[in-house]
Image (cartoon, helix red, strand yellow):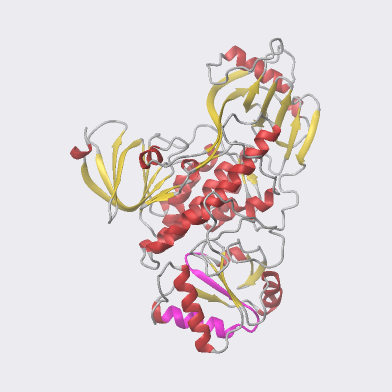
Amino acid sequence: MSDNAAVEDEETDVLIVGGSLVGLTTSLLLSRYGVRNTVVEKHRGTAIHPRAASFHQRTMEVFRHAGVQQIVEEAAAGEFVQNGAIVAVESLCGKELQYFYRSWNEGVEDLSATSRLFITQVGLEPLLRDAAAAAGATHLFGTQMLHVQQDADGVSTTVQSRDGGQSRVIRSRYVVAADGAHSAIREQLGIDMPGHGTADCVTVYFGADMTDMIGDRNLSVIYVLHPQMLGFFRFSFDRQSGFLSIFSVTDPETGKHYDLGADVPDERAVDWVRLALGCPADTPVRIDSIQHWEASASCAERFSEGRIFLAGDSAHTMPPTGGWGGNTGVADAHNLAWKLAMVVHGQADPRLLDSYDQERRPTALMTVEQAYSIYAGRYAERSSSSDAKPLAEPRPAEDIELGAVYRSGALADSDAAPYAAGEEATTRDPRAQGTPVGARVAHLVLQRDGQDLSTHDLVAERFVLLTGAAGDRWREAAAALADESGVPLEGVLLEADDAGRIAAGLGLGDDDALILRPDGVVAWRGDGPADQADSVSRLREAMAQLLGHPAPVAA
């Protein structure tokens, strides 16, 4: 049926194409901000394969912000023993080669109010779906996106149920394309994905009794660096099943690599599992399923076009080494959702949305290069892609996870001019004192209403002004500005016992101030004002910049 025959009978503020991890996170955050949103997903349900099992502290901060941290942690505890080691072995029963982490949270315990954890997308996605639906989102699973067409006022998206029937058009102000590595929307927009090429890989889901093989070791991720195989293991809580993701297999007699893009008979998969386990040839192994996939490292040339925004794998792909793929997609959702909400609610100018590409693309590009560097250096020969770009110098994992520094027009700082085309974002040590404009605010524990909170708990749907111990003039100015022009800014008074310690940790003088965005990024810094009128004027100018207005917000 042609698009012309479709019936335009639905409206929403934001349409999200793709109902996996990133699409559902976007839906949940928008719903928490009171934005009408509809998810269209071609599959009839959430994930059936346990992908993206490792989630970083920044991702857990997003889930904390969205109100689901506790239920995610509870579900994770039912899937895996948490905080295990990440180790390289020749085989599970063979020689241990290197421990990358003795404990997954080793050395980062004080950097966040949250912890890294392991949970599969099978366990996580239904939680996000239910929470978003409870907050008012509409989810249309088993529905295919056929075509998108944007104009000056919005986007018309033609969809159709997989059960057949007439196609229909959903009209929205904006569209988020979270439709995966082979994004139909990205292809329709003609946005290229340059990168390092792809490699065929395969994941074997299997059953076997690995109790004695694992023994008393708490192993979360096991990389297999066997002379005949490169890959990694994950095991179930009861050690009776797991999956083996394979990057390459070499025939010991011919030295040739097996074509992992070809069909893999169950008998061959059993042999591969036994090889990686290092167990006897008669060990019972059951093959549950075999999934083919591509290890790729690429980043879209732009993350938005008009009213359409790319997020997650539609914007960037990376090999699973480091676990950055899903986490980077959640960060996309976090960055974009509050900006869409403020524009939809009339609090910000649509120019604010330009900062999504300016901030997320250089950060994603940096992460892609880091993930590829680990993959290529550890498990694979260099890609056959035509570029001769050397492998990126490795950065500490916590710097990538928590220390990326944004530069965009949505930051009130003369030094925050956007990165040049193709330039990777810089990072900083999240342990360093103070927080520059464009960086995630440091996690500091403070008291509020008698409870311990993180500095990250202060932000919600508004900007937050934090001041030093003598910052009453700033807080009064914030209240005056909010009253006179509706600027979404709240001044926070730190309790006396906290003020000096928190101000020192953030690099604030007694009468200095900083503004936090809803995503916990420092957006502006100011030193002591000359007088009350000066403080109001400076805050008005800063908030105009932060909200994308072309001129200061009028009094």
The residue lying toward the viewer, choosing from 96 and 415, is: 415
Query: Is residue 80 visible to us here?
Result: no
Q: Quadrant of the C terminus?
A: bottom left
Q: Is residue 339 left or right of residue 520?
A: left
Q: Is residue 96 above or below residue 59?
A: above
Q: Position of residue 307 (x, y in %)?
A: 36, 53
Q: Is residue 476 within the magenta segment?
A: yes
Image quadrant in which you'd find residue 231 = top right
Q: Is residue 501 left or right of residue 164?
A: right
Q: Position of residue 427 (x, y in %)?
A: 65, 55
Q: Is residue 250 within the magenta segment?
A: no
Query: Is residue 251 visible to us here?
Result: yes
Q: Is residue 91 above or below residue 358?
A: above
Magenta-tinted stretch? 460-483
Q: Is residue 464 left or right of residue 5?
A: right
Q: Position of residue 53 (x, y in %)?
A: 60, 39
Q: Quadrant of the N terminus?
A: top left
Say how many tags the image has: 0
Residue depicted at 56% across the width and 42% down the height = 325
The residue lying toward the viewer, choosing from 62 and 4, is: 4
Residue depicted at 24% across the width and 37% down the height = 167
Q: Position of residue 90 (x, y in %)?
A: 76, 25
Residue depicted at 72% across the width and 58% down the height = 110
